[in-house]
Image (cartoon, grey):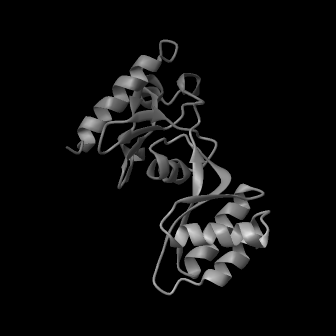
Amino acid sequence: MELTTEQAKEIAQRAITEAGWDSNEAIVVDEYTQEFDVGWVFCYQSARFLRTGEFGFQLVGNAPFFVSRLDGYAAFISYLRPVVESIEAFRACGDANAYQVAQVRLTGWLPGAQKVEATRLIRKFAPLGLEEAKRAVDCCLASQNTVIETSDVASANCLVARLAEIGFLSAVVYRTAVA
C-alpha cells in the first residue's frame, strides 16, 4: 500500500524530532516539500526561526529527509549533491544515499542492437581488450548480466548513454553508502 503525503510527512517529522536540534524544535516546511514518483523529500527548519525570523534560531546543516512512497523507507540525504541524484540512487538500488561507481551493468538489448559498435564502445570506455569486450557483449546478448569496469564514473555514464543509442540496455552500478 502506498503512503499518502500526510503519512510520509508524519514519518519525516518523527525522525526530524528524534534527531534533536539543541532545544530548537524543528518542523517540516511544507512549501519546500518535493514530490517524486518514488517518494517525497522534506525540508525542515527551527519553529522559532520560522515564527520570529531571528537568524540566531535558524538551523544550519539540516539535510533533506527522504521518505519512500511504497515501503516507508526513510533517510536523511546529502545536501552536498542535487536531490535528484539521491532520487536516482533510490530508484537504482533502494538507497537514497548510494553513490555511482565506475562500473556498468549490461542488462539487455533491443532488436537491432549493434553488437560490433557495442564492442567498440566498451573498448573505448573500459580498459578491456577485444576478446573481453566481445565476451561482455555476447553475455549480454545471451541474457546474462555482465558488469564492466570503467576508468571513472564519467566514463561509465558516457558508456551507458552511448550503448542506449545503439540498442543496449545498461546502467551505472550504485554502491550503498553504508558498508
Towards the viewer: 38 or 19: 38
List the single residue furthest toward the top. Answer: 23
Q: x, y (%) of residue 120?
A: 73, 78
- With respect to residue 155, does 117 lie above or below? below
Residue 65 lies in quadrant? top left
The residue depicted at 61 percent of the width and 81 percent of the height is: 115
Question: Looking at this view, is 177 or 13 the one in front?
Answer: 177
Q: Position of residue 2 (x, y in %)?
A: 23, 45
Name of the residue lying farthest toward the bottom: 112
Is 106 placed above or below 69 here?
below
Instruction: Pick whichever, 129 or 124, lies toward us.
Output: 129
Q: Residue at x 34, y 24 (%)?
A: 14
> Between 88 and 26, which is closer to the camera in this rendering?
88
Q: Residue at x 55, y 52 (%)?
A: 85
Picture quarter with the C terminus: top right
Question: In the rendered image of this protein, does residue 108 appear above or below residue 78?
Answer: below
Horizontal side, residue 81 vs residue 69: left or right: right
Residue at 52% in and 38% down: 77
Residue 41 at x, y percent in the picture:
42, 43
Up-down: is 127 above or below 53? below
Residue ranking furthest to the left: 1
In the picture, measured across the screen, residue 120 lies left or right of residue 106, that is right
Q: Quadrant of residue 134?
A: bottom right
Is residue 156 shown left or right of residue 107?
Answer: right
- For the N terminus, give its image quadrant: top left
Q: Position of residue 123 (x, y in %)?
A: 76, 71
Q: How many marks?
A: 0
